[in-house]
Amino acid sequence: RSHLKVLLLLVHRHEIPTLQKNLEGYVGFANLPNQVYRKSVKRGFEFTLMVVGESGLGKSTLINSLFLTDLYSPEYPGPSHRIKKTVQVEQSKVLVKEGGVQLLLTIVDTPGFGDAVDNSNCWQPVIDYIDSKFEDYLNAESRVNRRLMPDSRVQCCLYFIAPSGHGLKPLDIEFMKRLHEKVNIIPLIAKADTMTPEECQQFKKQIMKEIQEHKIKIYEFPETDDEEEMKMIRRIKDRLPLAVVGSNTIIEVNGKRVRGRQYPWGVAEVENGEHCDFTILRNMLIRTHMQDLKDVTNNVHYENYRSRKLAAVTYNGVDNNKNKGQLTKSPLAQMEEERRDHVSKMRKMEQEMEQVFEMKVKEKLQKLRDSEVELQRRHEQMKKNLEAQHRELEERRRQHEEEKGGWEAQQRILEQQKLDASRTLEKNKKKKIF
Amino acid sequence: LAKMSGGGSTLLGYIGIDTIIEQMRKKTMKAGFDFNIMVVGNSGLGKSTLVNTLFKSQVSRRSAGWARDEKIPKTIEIKAVSHVLEEGGVKMKLTVVDTPGFGDQINNDNCWEPISKYINEQYEKFLKEEVNITRKKRIPDTRVHCCIYFITPTGHSLRSLDIEFMKRLSHSVNIIPVIAKSDTMTIEERLEFKQRVRKELEMGGIEVYPQKEFDEDMEDKSDNDKIREAMPFAVVGSDKEYQVNGKRVLGRKTAWGIVEVENPNHCEFAQLRDFLIRSHLQDLKEVTHNIHYETYRAKRLNENGGLHPITCNDTQESNL
């Protein structure tokens, strides 16, 4: 019966929000949060944070202060050493461990943003980067084998506003308008120790006014039912955009060791709520709203990207994205699809190979025929040569025979003459003896 | 009674030659003089505040009925505001030329052109007056004597725009770079930044005022060398007064202390003011007149084959 009650409780959760049924025995699902917690701790957390702003606004110092690391050590080539004059998008990873929990933090930096004389489209590399991370995730999500799905989507973008004291610059407005639907934007007033409290107030009001005018959607804190939390959230909302100061140098103030910046006229303390909003930012970013930032990125920004991308595919009717496969089918259907694809691919390959084979055979035959013809020709040629030689030889022999005949005839005549001569001589001799 | 001795200066009595200084002073005081200063830099760097602080009065464009949250203009405008200030019997007509919109756009290519054009237009105006047949006794001088360029205190180095601007304009006007809102930086950061800026200026071949080539003698050179070592001055401006140690000082009140504008340990405003107003004001005007203006004039005369002077009454364009 207790099991039934539990089931009823779960099923009617939406219809009876305020009536809680007491369980008649300990079931144990209250332990679920602990299980989730333990699993997450084992797995560790990931968070990708992007920082955007002109050089010299203290971005690196702020990151170092937030996470108490030296991600940007003094050896890191700062803006003064930068050679390239175009906007780059660079990733740095750092593993932060605290109390048994580990956080794999990826910081995406955008050196060169807003530093050139002509800054048109300097936001394009940033947009391309964010889109490419969404695309990677979309591909990973659509694969059949999804065991290892790394999430490198940008979950939060800290945008640094220069403390001019006037309002937003055209570049600020352009950038935020183009990125507010792709990523959670948290605008910050950089180097807030430049301004007096009144100037800061004025500046914040002006910025919020302009943000509303241009309908820029910055990250909104979620409403909760908890009265305490709502109070805190309202307090944060009043102080938007947060005016921050960063520092990692420790200074002694009234016997206490604090992080701050030492001026001849005093020490600006980073963690003092009356000096700047750094603690608010840190608490919000790390201690309370990190998970919400990830959720909003996943549920809102990523889904927007995904539906836009897929709508483009189905609208055109043509599969523009050849490598993605049909994303709207179930896994089994997809497997069948893949198998069919594979089989047809194999068949095609087979056909191709046969074609190639035939072609090769034809070629070879042709070659053989050609060489046969060639050989025949040569054979004829040689025969002709031989005959010619043969005839020549015949001719020579005939000549030779002729000559021989002639020479023999001559010899005979000579012989005869000699014989006649000797006979005559003998006759004469005989006559003479008388 | 004085005897003329060749080359020597031993006079046998008091003549009174040295009273000429007093006469000059009296004349200058009566005539008053013009000083035109231009301020260039991104909006929000405290240009107007600094000018107000320098001249201890509300002389900038901002004070002339301009609202604080006026929108950044879409193109550069050149706005000149004039005031007549008097001190110790000396009258000065101060004109502050502001350049709102400089460097504020997304694409800032050629944003220095309107400024360059304005400067040359003032030279042209003066030139036209000079070549007239019947000249005014005192030609009104609207030429820019000094251009204060405000460097953003990034703490790293000069921006591309800074270098471009200064390269192109250092030959037509006296440029004095200052580090704006220097209460952003600690003393160490400031020193590093200054060194790097000086190195970058040197590498870019940019000659800021006081230019080395115009030092007239050893005394000048040593004075100016000291100034060049300290430039660019890191300044803070303010027009509000606070009580510090029983004194009323100009400053900025933050949650962790009061930045005193005229305290040399806090910022270099006092140095800039002394340099600009108390010692080199006349020199700025002279360099503008004798060097920058003459360069412009020579260039113009060599174009178009020469100038034809016209009378005041001629309403046509002169045949320049």
Image (cartoon, rainbow, N blue to C red):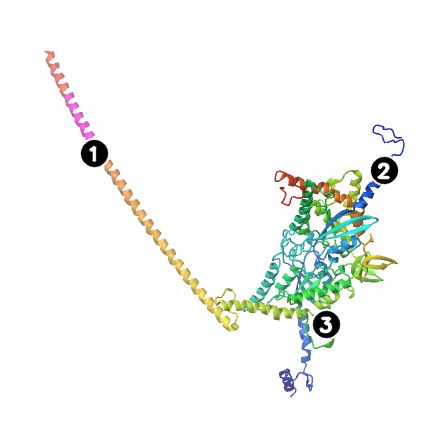
Query: Which residue was labeled with disc 1?
Result: A398
Q: Where is residue B12 in the image (x, y as percent from the top left)?
A: 89, 31
Between marks 3 and 1 in the image, the one whose residue lies nearer the viewer: 3
Q: Residue at x 17, y 25 (%)?
A: A410
Left or right: where A193 falls relative to A21 = right
Host chain of mark 2: B
Residue B138 in the image: state x and y as whole percent: 74, 43
Q: Pick the quarter of the image with the C terminus of chain A.
A: top left
Residue A408, horizontal then vertical, whole percent: 18, 28
Q: Distance between the residues labelled 1 and 2?
A: 146 Å
Q: Give the range drawn in magenta.
A: A400-418
Q: Closer to the camera, B70 or B152?
A: B70
Q: Residue A234 carries which label?
A: 3
Which is more toward the observer, A347 or B91? Answer: B91
Closer to the camera, A346 or A307? Answer: A307
Find the residue positioned furthest to the bottom: A1
Give the distance between the C-alpha atoms of the residues marked 2 and 3, in whole angstroms: 75 Å
Q: What element carries label 1?
A: helix
What element does badge 2 sit on?
loop
Q: Mainly helix, strand or loop, the magenta region?
A: helix
Q: Does the magenta stretch include residue A39?
A: no
* Label disc, if present, on residue A17 of the rendered structure: none
| Residue at the spot of label 2 | B18
Query: Chain letter of disc 3?
Result: A
